Amino acid sequence: MYIHVMNHAVDPAMAEKGDPVLPRPAPDGKEECICFLLRSAARRASALYTRHLARIGLGLPQHSLIGMAAAFEKQNGRPATVTELARALDLDRTTLTRNIKPLVDSGLLSVDAAARGGRARAVRATFEGRAAYCAGVALWRQAQDEMIAGLRQDYPGLMRGLAAAIAAVPDRPSGTADRDF
């Protein structure tokens, strides 16, 4: 850490504000960690969207989950199974199941045996869930517009770059828990 601190460039904006200046995490002390920067960007973006969606009592992950469940059913004529929804949201099944529970408890989602039989469980947005999702779309749009305005002309290139970067990263092994939903 000492070598990293000594060799790391100081962010002048942070130093001017009187904020403590710490280096960004980089185990080798030579370059910034891509994962840290992506996670930091994701946390800031999530906070912005959540601030807008707070008016309807949902965070961005909950809003997205309800919307994905409703969209899957509309497109496929049947509700998604937990496995299908986990795949669509790029989440581990266990993580998704844990995140579905509060939405079921609040009446925004329902989980029943899938029509296909077996152990599969079908996730459906309830009438209340669809109403909450619809109420949040305009709020989501405000957050999206705020993000785009902040990124200005960098937005199209950034989106292409992120899509390419995500496609280039290998999938995580099955069973790997995703703790950031």
Image (cartoon, grey):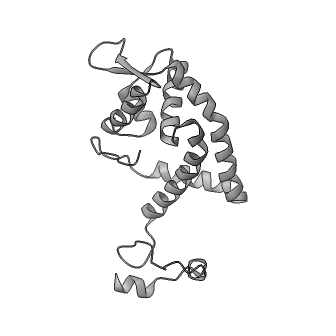
Where 1 falls versus 118 (above or below)? Answer: below
User: 110 or 176: which is nearer to us?
Assistant: 110
Residue 134 sits in which quadrant? top right
Q: Quadrant of the C terminus?
A: top left
For residue 98, which quarter of the picture?
top left
**Can residue 132 be seen here?**
yes
Residue 156 visible: no
Check the image and report above or below for 176 versus 38: above
Q: How many marks?
A: 0
Against 130, residue 14 (above or below) is below
Residue 89: percent from left, percent from top:
45, 37
Residue depicted at x 48% and y 48%: 167
**Left or right: 173, with 108 as reference point:** left
* Left or right of 153 on screen, residue 59: left
Q: What's the residue at 51%, 42% (across, down)?
A: 59
> Where residue 137 sits: x, y (%)?
63, 34
Judge by depth and name the residue closer to the eye, 19 or 79.
19
Outermost residue, bottom side = 6
Q: Is residue 165 above or below residue 93?
A: below
Q: Measured from the top left, where is residue 158 in percent x and y?
A: 62, 56
| Quadrant for the N terminus in the image | bottom left
Q: Residue at x 54, y 57 (%)?
A: 44
x 40%, y 71%: residue: 25
